[in-house]
Image (spheres, helix red, strand yellow):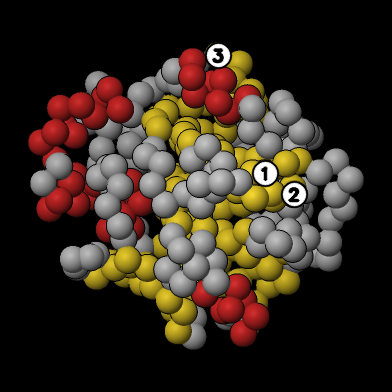
Amino acid sequence: MGSVFHSGEAALQAAAGSRERLAEVGTRVIRQEMPEQHRAFFAGLPFVVLAATDPGGQPHATLLAGPPGLLTATDSRHLQLASLPAPDDPLHPLLTPGARFGLLGIEPHTRRRNRANGRVQARGADGLHLEVTQSFGNCPKYIQPRRAVFDPSWKPGARAEHRLSLNEAERAWIAAADTFFIATAHPSDDADPAHGVDVSHRGGPPGFISVEGNTLGIDDFAGNNYFNTLGNLLLNPQAGLLFPDFARGGLLQLNATAEILPGPPRRLLLRVSKVTHHPAAQPLRWEEASG
């Protein structure tokens, strides 16, 4: 098996001084199959974050939620996801057999998160069968504790709004956020598992995201030094951002172009080019949880 890290990730690891260590342990921290603890973790989740790319290479991310059994591992290499994005979600037409996907399972109240990347194997009326080619965990840093509970009485809100720029209410929403998700992708759509789609969590205290017009800025704090997100952005600056509204249940999906500014701390600028706002899109209740 070759390196589990592609050239963009390796370049940033070398700059951070972690390349030698990760080159040695890479195949142990990023596996081709899911360990039993990841399979059990996924099975207990009421929601997952899913990402895919459109034909132009633009990544998109969404949140899918459901009752227990939303996500099940049929074996160490396959997941069954019992949900599909809404018809007005940018991901809805993209999740076809053979499409690359990135999946993040996160449990904010325990600060656990695990990732699975691969390809869609089949799509049915009620969900997706996913083939996993990369499986790995993440450190618990910067996850804001809250508990997600599936709400069976939920009813969808109005259809999504599509615009080319943020409005003032959305700028305020982002400026007050303590959590968002970012989808990125390697520019090559080939058979190398390292050249996939990835979706990851970003968090911090309210105000950790600066907002100036349609440009968002965040400092990139040290994590596991894999540089999955920034490594992709180094090669393909297109990003898909997802902001959940934990109070009102909305979702904000943004297309953005990224610029990586050298540090320390390294800073990420995200210039928004498209906005999709889904009112009352989450069939979840969010409850307080102690940190």
- Residue corresponding to mark 1: 148
Q: CA distance from mark 1 to mark 3?
A: 26 Å
| Residue 57 coordinates in the image, percent (x, y) | 46, 56
**Amino acid under label 2?**
Arg
Between 167 and 127, the residue placed more toward the observer is: 167
Of labels 2 and 3, earlier in sequence is 3
Q: Which mark is residue 75?
A: 3
Q: Secondary structure at mark 1?
A: strand
Q: Residue furthest front?
A: 290
Q: Is residue 44 visible?
A: yes
| Residue 288 coordinates in the image, percent (x, y) | 65, 50
Circle 1/circle 2 CB separation < 8 Å: yes
Left or right of 136 in this view: 17: left
**Amino acid under label 1?**
Ala
The correct choice, above or below, for 48 with respect to 255 in the image is above
Say which residue appears at 65% left-offset and 80% top-offset: 169
Q: Is residue 98 visible?
A: no
Say which residue appears at 49% left-offset and 68% top-offset: 206
The correct choice, above or below, for 108 with respect to 117 in the image is below
Q: Which mark is residue 285?
A: 2
| Residue 107 coordinates in the image, percent (x, y) | 56, 39
Give the crowd class for mark 3: few <14, some 14-19, many >=20 residues within 10 Å.
some
Between 255 and 120, the residue placed more toward the observer is: 255
Of labels 1 and 2, earlier in sequence is 1
Say which residue appears at 55% left-offset and 71% top-offset: 176
Q: Which mark is residue 279?
A: none
Q: Secondary structure at mark 3?
A: strand
